[in-house]
């Protein structure tokens, strides 16, 4: 039976370390602060925003929430982002995606100051990830890397397969594994014979969004299996891209869903916000 990669536990540990640092910063008059903009009434987004507020509380951060109606308007939203860019008390800015229909998400993301872009979506920060310069790391891939490190799993020299090539998960995930000297393959919807690619992987990372796509006969015995996917199964229960019950019998390590990558994503957002606050203090 595979060992569980416990993201919930590691995220708690990270958040208590962050709290210790933020308490010190608060006493020096520089409380880390995250501004979250929620536009429209997407129920899933509302849950994500609520969780971020809770995480901020646990980390001793100030959390500023802007709940805007769907018809708020792109120009007004850009003006709000710009005012937050200018506000020295705000260290991180996050615009909850997806935005309602009619908004140009790219334009909004590009308007966030790279120094406050704690999601690491701005092209400036994406470029830094590509060339390996220090900066914010994207929350989900960085959370996966911390989880691997915690359990002593070193990607160096290993066959790593990332399934999915989105800008927020798959592509940066591949870059971070490459930085750690993994031999990285990226699979996507046009990949031929995904199963045989999977069977070659020492570390398999599924970031697809298809419930239980990855079956036990696709896993190399002893492989490390990371499940980024968040889906609902036929009974409406939260599940990943990996058929957990089957695959845990073949893998050496595996992440559960929930309790694996999700909490790590949230913890890295807090880590990035702390980093932004520390950086702003250095630049005073
Ligand atoms: P996305 O933008 O929809 O990308 C999905 C990727 O999967 C695409 O690159 C797509 O290929 C590929 N794909 C689709 N069907 C495939 C198939 N049958 N075989 C191989 N590849 C296939 O999704 P995302 O934003 O990266 O998110 C992926 C999943 O992770 C979702 O379930 C999402 O909810 C979850 N997620 C979880 C967290 C977390 O914290 N746990 C964070 C972010 C996302 P093409 O490029 O060819 O279309």
Image (tube, rainbow, N blue to C red):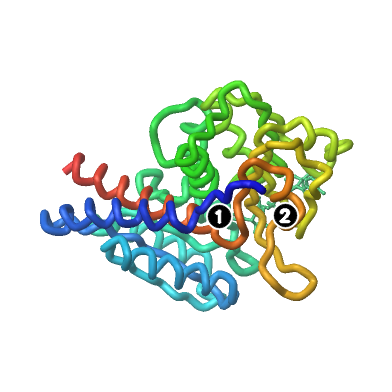
Residue at position x 73%, y 53% in the image:
242
Q: Looking at the image, which is closer to me, 129 or 37?
A: 129
Mark number for residue 241? 2
Residue at position x 34%, y 64% in the image:
56
- The furthest residue to the front: 1
Position of 100 with respect to 92 (left or right) is right
Position of 277 with respect to 225 (left or right) is left
Task: Find numbered disc 1 in the image and state the secondary structure of the residue it sits on.
Answer: loop
Indicate whether 24 appears above or below 170.
Answer: below
Q: Earlier in the sequence, mark 1 or mark 2?
A: 2
Mark number for residue 260? 1
Q: Position of residue 134 (x, y in %)?
A: 39, 32
> In this orientation, does residue 238 appear?
yes
Task: Find numbered disc 2 in the image and state the secondary structure of the residue it sits on.
Answer: loop
Residue at position x 49%, y 40% in the image:
151
Residue at position x 21%, y 59% in the image:
31
Callout 1–callout 2 Cβ contact below 8 Å: no
The answer to whether the residue bearing label 1 lies less than 8 angstroms from the nearest atom of ligand 1 is yes
């Amino acid at each position: 039976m595979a060992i569980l990669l416990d993201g919930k536990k590691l995220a708690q540990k990270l958040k208590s370390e962050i709290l210790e640092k933020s308490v010190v910063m608060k006493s020096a008059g520089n409380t880390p602060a995250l501004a979250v903009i929620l536009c429209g009434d997407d129920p899933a987004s509302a849950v994500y925003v609520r969780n971020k507020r809770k995480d901020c509380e646990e980390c001793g951060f100030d959390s500023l929430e802007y709940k805007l109606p769907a018809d708020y308007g792109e120009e007004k939203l850009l003006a709000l982002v710009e005012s937050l860019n200018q506000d020295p008390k705000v260290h991180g800015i996050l615009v909850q995606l997806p935005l309602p229909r009619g908004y140009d998400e790219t334009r909004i993301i590009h308007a966030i100051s790279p120094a406050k872009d704690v999601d690491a979506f701005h092209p400036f920060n994406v470029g830094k990830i590509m060339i390996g310069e220090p900066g914010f790391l994207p929350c989900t891939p960085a959370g996966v890397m911390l989880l691997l490190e915690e359990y002593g799993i070193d990607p160096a020299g290993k066959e790593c397969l990332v399934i999915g090539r989105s800008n927020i998960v798959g592509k940066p995930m591949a870059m971070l594994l490459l930085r750690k000297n993994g031999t990285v393959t990226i699979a996507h919807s046009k990949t031929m014979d995904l199963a045989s690619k999977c069977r070659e992987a020492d570390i398999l990372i599924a970031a697809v969004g298809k419930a239980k796509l990855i079956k036990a006969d696709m896993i190399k015995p002893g492989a490390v299996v990371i499940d980024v996917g968040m889906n609902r199964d036929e009974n409406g229960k939260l599940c990943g891209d990996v058929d957990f019950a089957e695959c845990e019998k073949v893998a050496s390590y595996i992440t559960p869903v929930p309790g694996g990558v999700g909490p790590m994503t949230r913890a890295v957002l807090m880590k990035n916000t702390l980093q932004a606050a520390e950086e702003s203090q250095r630049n005073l």
